[in-house]
Image (cartoon, rainbow, N blue to C red):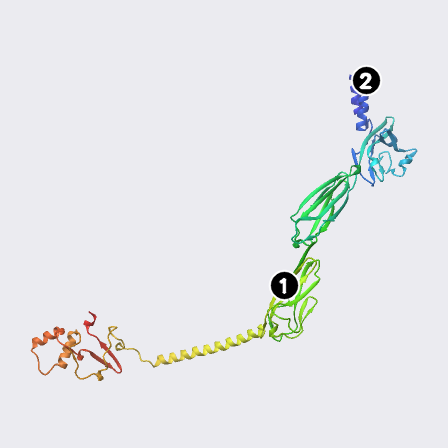
Amino acid sequence: MALRMTARCLRNNPIQDGLNVSILFVLCFVSGVVYGSQVIVPPKVNAVLGKNVTLSCRVKVDTNLSLTQSSWERKLPTGWVTLAVYNPMFGISVPPEYKRRLSFRSPSMHDATIMLEDVGFSDIGIYTCKVATFPLGNTQASTTISVLVEPKVYVSAGSSALIDGGNETTVATCIAERGRPPADVSWETDLYGTSEAHMQDDANGTTTTQVHYTWRPSRHAQGHILTCVVKHPALQNDFRIPYTVNVQFAPDIQVLGYDGDWYVGRENVQLQCRAKANPPAQHFRWIRLDGDMPEGAELLNSSLVFTKSLQKNDSGVYRCEVANDIGLQSRDIRIRVQEMSQKQMTSSMAIAGAVMGAVLALFLITVFTIVLLTARKVPPPTYTDKVIDLPPTHKPPPPYTERPPTIPLASQAPQVASFSQARRIERRYEPAERVPGRQARRDFQNPTHHSLTYQEWICHQNGADRVYINHREHYV
């Protein structure tokens, strides 16, 4: 197609024959296309230093043409040199300087692919695949080889040890050494630290990349995993290196064995001192703070063992001391030896409660029975059982039988009696000498004009009960 368009262009511009021929040659060189044949190569090939690289070349030839030869050439500062030749009739030819490292993969009329082994920096350059057909001649296409240098990846620990609670320091450094192009390096972690990258150029166009991870150490991150991730074109997959955080800390102590139910006579008891430390604890010691260590208490590894049955004087405050290269730590525990176990105390309290409950129930039953029997013997109350209108300051007179025959009441305050009471008193206690009728009636109608006697108190007896009725003037 390109040939036809160029020929049509030449017919339209016959004066510029030399220019159009040059244009035709350039088009054929760039596209690798000649009428009836085509050469296809990748535009760029990345080769890893020290490894093998494949230069692909596919050939498309029409059926009316025949492939006479395919070859590879390389451009050097001194000119073009032939690397390999394939001829269907005469076979393969490779120059001596490339014979050990270069070969055709599967030579045929449609494939001119070659393999180059142990690639070095000297192999960087332009390579051309040429195909000769009959009767059209040569068709070619070019590609460029770039040499990649796979970085050497490793992780190194920080310059100083990580101490719990210490200052911010470098935990680890991820290094991608002598990579071409420079490697992409990062850290993966959920710690709240920071990353800092440094790059350094080396020989042959390589670069060394270092990424430091800085963090303030804490014992809670002991054993945590940091992951160094490196990405590079020379690597088929991301390169990942795990790093375990090592934080040193003083012992963290826990005392076990005391269940709160130590009692006199209990046997086979001990206090266990467990310590979590980095580096591991090397020193264990048991002491008693409020006195001497009791007889029969012995140190066995990290435990305080009571070889004898417990006594009351075993009660006290005990301390476990643990030390490592970072420091010394201690933990105190107060032991109380009781007279009896909690189970025995619970049983005794249950029995005492049951006895007290039974006694209380019996007492309530007795009281209820007495009240019930007493209520049955008491007669029902009558109207005369009530005290009617007695003033709070008045005392009732003595019993009727104890009164003197006649007691004048001239010195007492005047009393007021009802008309019916006055009539009854007049008929019962009227003296021998009668007074005139009008005068008597006037005196009874106005009883305040004469002295009162004890008869004006009405005594009503009903067995042993008495009701005293006070006169009305006491309420004035």
Q: In the figure, residue 116 lies in which quadrant?
A: top right
Residue 235 seen in the current view: no
CA–CA distance between discs 2 and 1?
Answer: 104 Å
Q: Where is residue 139 in the image (x, y as percent from the top left)?
A: 84, 28
Q: Is residue 54 visible?
A: yes
The amino acid marked with disc number 1 is Arg
Looking at the rendered image, the quarter that the C terminus falls into is bottom left
**Residue 289 at x, y = what percent?**
61, 67
Which of the two residues, 187 or 301, is positioned nearer the viewer here?
Answer: 301
Q: Provide the secondary structure element on which disc 1 rests.
A: strand
The label nearer to you, 2 versus 1, is 1
- For the residue carrying disc 1, how many other residues have a C-alpha within 10 Å: few (<14), some (14-19), or many (20+)? some
Residue 79 location in percent, x, y? 86, 28
Neighbour class for label 2 at 10 Å: few (<14), some, many (≥20)?
few
- Residue ID at (61%, 66%): 333
Q: Tell me the residue that label 1 is attached to.
A: 331
x and y percentages locating residue 220 in the rendered image: 65, 54
**Residue at far right of view:** 90
Image quarter for residue 124?
Answer: top right
Residue behind mark 2: 17
Instruction: Depth check: give the residue in front, 367 or 135.
Output: 367
